[in-house]
Image (tube, coloured by chain):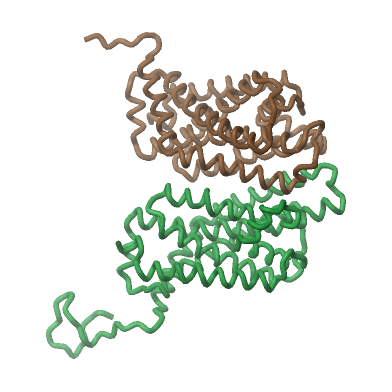
């Protein structure tokens, strides 16, 4: 492809200006996007065992603990309802956590090892970079979600009422958290930073989101806190699809999620375009 | 210049112990604060989900039942994490020779690491307990039981962490041990429920799990209520600790995966 045109008598030295070569890219550089996405997906695939086995086992442990912890309610309608409620919460929690971790750790790893330069040098803009990382994170989240579902299904089967809505909320929640993970990855300079963001910010928000207990049963200050947390809407909408019942109208949840995705996506794109902590 | 050391190389032992403690204190946000926050989150979530304030386990409210179990989980997980990560990081980075070369006996070498693990476990335990206490006063029934079980459990997990860290060649191996052995044993040990309430077969399995005994005995120290036999529990803990010491010292003596 780079060989001189056959009509040329003398080959040009390497690096010489070749005005006839067309290096323009369109408004969206598809090849660069596909390449970066492919690399990120291979990264997900490489870690698949950790994305699948560990979350599935953890979910089964949580489920077992809750099932045993029901005490006298075990085997009653109340107890069964608690377990039905729990399964979508566990699946969604894994989706959200893995979706955030994957792009976050990928970015910090590249920054620390210094090979982020390979991606910054390539003709990639924020409009290709951000979707590539976000989609790979979404895929990681969904992969672990299916694994947790499979693990939980071994213990307790909860039929999915509305598969499309469930999948839609799963994807939207996963995308939102992949973008959050990118944000954390951009602002972190070392492992300590990213693990602090995850421990003190992402994990509490994910845990205190109505994943385990109905928000209606919570004391007043906590309920307000949970309802201000966008992750609550991801889990509640997901549950609306899976169980057919939810705390919020799923339309409201969808709107909150869409707004959060746009907001976080805009911030991440802006930081990428600026090169914040990436090109400095 | 005489360089002989006595029966115990006190300077060496103290130096390595100090290194092991400084190692985690330097990054206390990750090694102390993070596990405390995680444990408190667990406490909040499980308290809410499992019926919270009104439920009773035997004669005590569920919140008082759950507290000691979670504190014990934090102690054990951090004791394990400390020794396993210390030895594995040294191996991967190659600076393990710095502790293998000095005139330290296997017992001195192992003791320094184990003490580091115990100190971190107990520190996390004390901070977690103090924080929980602000919301739910746990009460103390028998300080001796609390102390013995905390130290015995932290030692057991420190030893397991050392053995695991010596065996593992990379971080994936260690993650697998944590995810597939330590966490399941900790979860299915009666931290979150009384084993009296579970089907007989599972109760029998729970009684085979050493984690069950130290959580039960530790909790007894707080609430004065037990699921098992306290005497058996103490014997199991002493026996498992001795067995692990024997395995570890044997590994160190032969230089298994360390001097090969």
Task: Give percent across and percent down for residue A166.
Answer: 68, 68
Q: Residue furthest left?
A: A10
Task: Give percent across and percent down for residue A262.
Answer: 52, 72
Q: Nearer the viewer, residue B78 or B111?
A: B78
> Is residue A279 rendered to the left or right of residue A47?
left
Chain B colour as displayed: brown
Q: Quadrant of the N terminus of chain B?
A: top left
> Is residue B183 rendered to the left or right of residue A6?
right
In the picture shown, does residue B11 fall above or below B37? above
Task: Give percent across and percent down for residue B232.
Answer: 72, 20
Task: Give percent across and percent down for residue B163.
Answer: 50, 30
The quarter holding residue A279 reads bottom left
Q: Nearer the viewer, residue A32 or A218?
A: A218
* Observer able to see residue A151: no
Residue located at (43% from left, 50% from top): A193
> Is residue B53 rendered to the left or right of residue B128?
right
Q: Nearer the viewer, residue B209 or A227?
A: A227
In the picture shown, does residue A258 fall above or below A24? above
Q: Quadrant of the C terminus of chain B?
A: top left
Number of marks in the rendered image: 0
Q: Residue furthest front?
A: A221
Q: Residue furthest bottom?
A: A7
> Is residue A115 rendered to the left or right of residue B161?
left
Chain A colour as displayed: green
């Amino acid at each position: 492809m780079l060989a001189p045109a056959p009509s040329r008598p003398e080959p040009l030295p390497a690096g010489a200006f070749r005005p006839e070569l067309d290096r323009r890219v369109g408004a969206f550089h598809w090849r660069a996007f596909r390449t970066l996405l492919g690399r990120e997906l291979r990264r997900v695939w490489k870690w698949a065992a950790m994305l699948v086995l560990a979350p599935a086992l953890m979910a089964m442990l949580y489920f077992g603990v809750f099932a045993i912890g029901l005490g006298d309610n075990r085997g009653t309608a109340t107890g069964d309802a608690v377990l039905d409620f729990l399964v979508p919460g566990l699946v969604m929690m894994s989706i959200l956590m893995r979706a955030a971790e994957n792009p976050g750790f990928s970015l910090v790893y590249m920054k620390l090892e210094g090979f982020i330069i390979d991606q910054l040098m390539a003709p990639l803009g924020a409009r290709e970079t951000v979707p590539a990382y976000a989609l790979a994170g979404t895929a990681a989240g969904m992969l672990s979600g299916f694994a947790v579902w499979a693990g939980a299904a071994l213990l307790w089967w909860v039929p999915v009422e509305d598969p499309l809505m469930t999948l839609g909320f799963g994807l939207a929640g996963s995308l939102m958290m992949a973008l959050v993970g990118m944000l954390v990855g951009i602002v972190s300079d070392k492992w300590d930073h990213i693990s602090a963001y995850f421990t003190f910010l992402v994990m509490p928000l994910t845990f205190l989101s109505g994943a385990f207990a109905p928000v209606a049963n919570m004391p007043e200050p906590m309920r307000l806190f949970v309802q201000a947390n966008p992750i609550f809407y991801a889990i509640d909408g997901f549950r609306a699809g899976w169980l057919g019942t939810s705390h919020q109208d799923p339309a409201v949840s969808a709107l909150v999620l869409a707004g959060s995705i746009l907001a976080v996506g805009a911030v991440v794109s802006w930081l990428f375009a600026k090169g914040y902590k990436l090109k400095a | 210049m005489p360089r002989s050391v006595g029966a115990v190389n006190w300077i060496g032992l103290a130096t390595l112990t100090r290194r092991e403690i400084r190692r985690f204190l330097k990054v206390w946000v990750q090694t102390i604060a993070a596990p405390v926050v995680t444990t408190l989150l667990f406490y909040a979530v499980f308290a809410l989900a499992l019926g919270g304030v009104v439920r009773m386990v035997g004669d005590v409210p569920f919140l008082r039942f759950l507290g000691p179990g979670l504190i014990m989980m934090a102690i054990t997980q951090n004791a394990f994490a400390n020794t396993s990560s210390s030895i594995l990081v040294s191996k991967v980075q190659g600076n393990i020779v710095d502790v293998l070369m000095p005139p330290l006996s296997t017992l001195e070498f192992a003791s320094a690491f184990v003490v580091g693990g115990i100190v971190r476990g107990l520190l996390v335990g004390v901070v977690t307990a103090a924080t929980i206490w602000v919301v739910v006063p746990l009460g103390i029934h028998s300080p001796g039981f609390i102390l013995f079980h905390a130290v015995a459990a932290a030692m057991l997990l420190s030893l397991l962490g050392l053995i695991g860290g010596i065996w593992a060649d990379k971080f994936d191996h260690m993650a697998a041990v944590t995810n597939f052995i330590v966490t399941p044993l900790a979860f299915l040990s009666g931290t979150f429920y009384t084993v009296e309430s579970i089907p007989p077969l599972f109760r029998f399995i729970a009684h085979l799990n050493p984690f069950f005994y130290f959580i039960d005995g530790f909790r007894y120290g707080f609430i004065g209520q037990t699921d098992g036999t306290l005497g058996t529990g103490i014997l199991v803990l002493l026996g498992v600790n001795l067995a692990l010491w024997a395995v570890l010292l044997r590994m160190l003596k032969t230089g298994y995966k360390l001097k090969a």
